[in-house]
Amino acid sequence: MNPLLSLIVPAYNEAGRIGATITRVCAYLDRQPYAWELLVVIDGGDPAAVVEARHAAAGRGNARVIANSINRGKGYAVRQGFAEATGERLVFIDADLSLPIEALEPMLARFDAGADVVIGSRLAPGAREVGGPGGLRRVMSRVFNAVVQAAALPGLSDTQCGLKGFRAEAARRVFAHQATNGFGFDVEALFLARKLGYRIDELPVTCTYHDRSSVNRVRDALKMIADLVTIRWRHRHPIS
């Protein structure tokens, strides 16, 4: 019997933190009444992260660590985890847990209420930000969100939040066409979901910012804009 939930944790440069993340996630999921599986995708970087992750997941038949020898990008890691997932609901969450694992409960309730895709939002009514990003990061995030809304996804306030879930059938169809490996993969997945007619719900979340980040703000923002142009061109025709 397939689990209700497959949780994917993409990780890059998370040595020294990924073990604690796995321990915390498993402790939360152990308290839930449903069957689950955890797939941690270490996408290159310090090999110590693989050792740490495997140690934290040891002895758990429903927790696996997938190790990539080179860094291919967050989009690649999420797509890889989704391809190996067996659950009815497929969710990914950032490895630093800046979005709380407890948000899974209201997310699953949204699926039960009819949503096909549920995305965490730091900007939806009721959301909170703790610590707050730096001024430049905040400005760049708001500018990128405005560009995305204008060019691809009107009405979605926050496409880059690191907590997103899909019904298994929706995930299969969306990620069969999703090809962006970098941080722009979120936009492509949501663009495809909307194009395929899936219902997307935004879930307000509390985001606690951490100082440590693998994001190069200027470089990655420019790359995401380039990805947006590519996404619109790649999916300019109807899809089945």
Image (cartoon, rainbow, N blue to C red):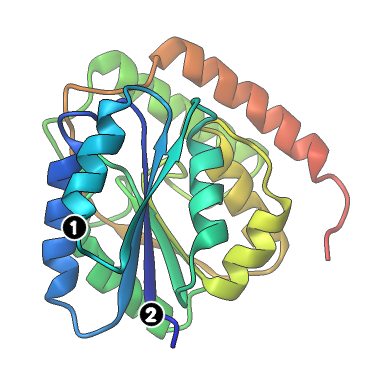
Q: Which residue lies under the disc numbered 1?
A: 25
Q: Nearer the viewer, residue 159 or 59?
A: 59
Disc 1 marks a residue whose amino acid type is: Val
The quadrant of the rendering that contains the C terminus is: bottom right
Q: Which residue lies under the disc numbered 2?
A: 4
SS under mark 1: helix
| In this rendering, position of residue 21 left or right of residue 107 | left
| In this rendering, position of residue 29 left or right of residue 38 | left
Q: Residue at x 15, y 73 (%)?
A: 30
Residue lying furthest front in this view?
A: 59
Find the distance from the CA under tag 2 to the CA under tag 1: 16 Å
Q: Residue at x 64, y 50 (%)?
A: 191
Q: Residue at x 17, y 42 (%)?
A: 19
| In this rendering, position of residue 140 left or right of residue 57 | right
Q: Residue at x 37, y 73 (%)?
A: 5
Mark before the other along the chain sequence, 2 or 1: 2
Q: Nearer the viewer, residue 130 or 79?
A: 79
Please tell me whether residue 67 is drawn above or below residue 22 in the rendered image: above
The quadrant of the rendering that contains the N terminus is: bottom left
| In this rendering, position of residue 87 left or right of residue 232 | left
x and y, in percent, of residue 128 in the image: 18, 47
